[in-house]
Image (cartoon, rainbow, N blue to C red):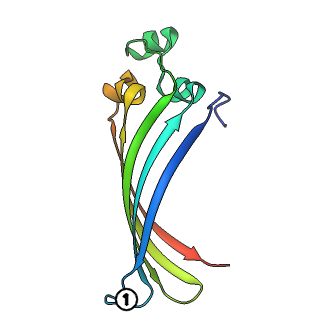
Amino acid sequence: DVTGHDSGWEVTLRGIVRRPVDFIDRGFIASFEADADWADQSYMHTYFDVTAPNAIRSGLPAYRTGAGLKSVGAALSFDQFLSRKWSVGIRLHYARLTNDAANSPVTRLAGSPDQYFAGLVVGYVL
């Protein structure tokens, strides 16, 4: 951890369904994913707590978190294999922070419980 803080543990439970979509193109694969993240107390303290000194500096109210379900999400991916080794793809992911993570002033006042991710991927199979 480059911040010098104990960041704790985060555990992800993920289910993925991948299907080739040959009627679009050979090598085209669509994927759907559902996931849930659980975080221990140390992780939650690192990323969602607002300590008294930080509350004074930031203007956010002090807040203390505990371990628990941090987020639930879903993703959609599309990949096109260009050869047996190379592929390109796109990933779209949405997650909703829950419980203490969603109620933290860091999220509620300074951020958002809605978390979005989009990315382009280049893949190489060894």
Residue 126 coordinates in the image, percent (x, y): 68, 78
Count every numbered label the image shows and give the total. Answer: 1
Q: Is residue 5 left or right of residue 78?
A: right
- The secondary element bearing badge 1 is classed as loop
Measured from the top left, where is residue 35 in percent x and y?
Answer: 44, 50
Q: Quadrant of residue 63?
A: top left
Q: Is residue 105 left or right of residue 84?
A: left
How many other residues sit within 10 Å of disc 1, few (<14), some (14-19) or many (≥20)?
A: few
- Image location (x, y in percent) of residue 3: 63, 32
Q: Quadrant of residue 4?
A: top right
- Give above or below for 52 relative to 94: above
Instruction: Let me know if residue 76 appears in the view.
Output: yes
Q: Is residue 39 left or right of residue 32?
A: right
The three-letter code of the residue at mark 1 reads Asp
Which of the two residues, 117 or 65, is positioned nearer the viewer here? 65
Quadrant in which the N terminus appears: top right
- Give the vertical position of 16 relative to 66 (above or below): below
Q: Is residue 48 above or below residue 126?
A: above
Could you tell me which residue is drawn at 54 percent across and 90 percent down?
83
Q: Quick check: can you spot residue 93?
A: no
Look at mark 1 in the image and give the residue it sits on: 22
Measuring from the top left, give residue 82's x and y in whole percent: 49, 87
Residue at 39%, 44% in the rendered image: 72
Residue at horizontal 32 percent and vertical 35 percent from the top: 112
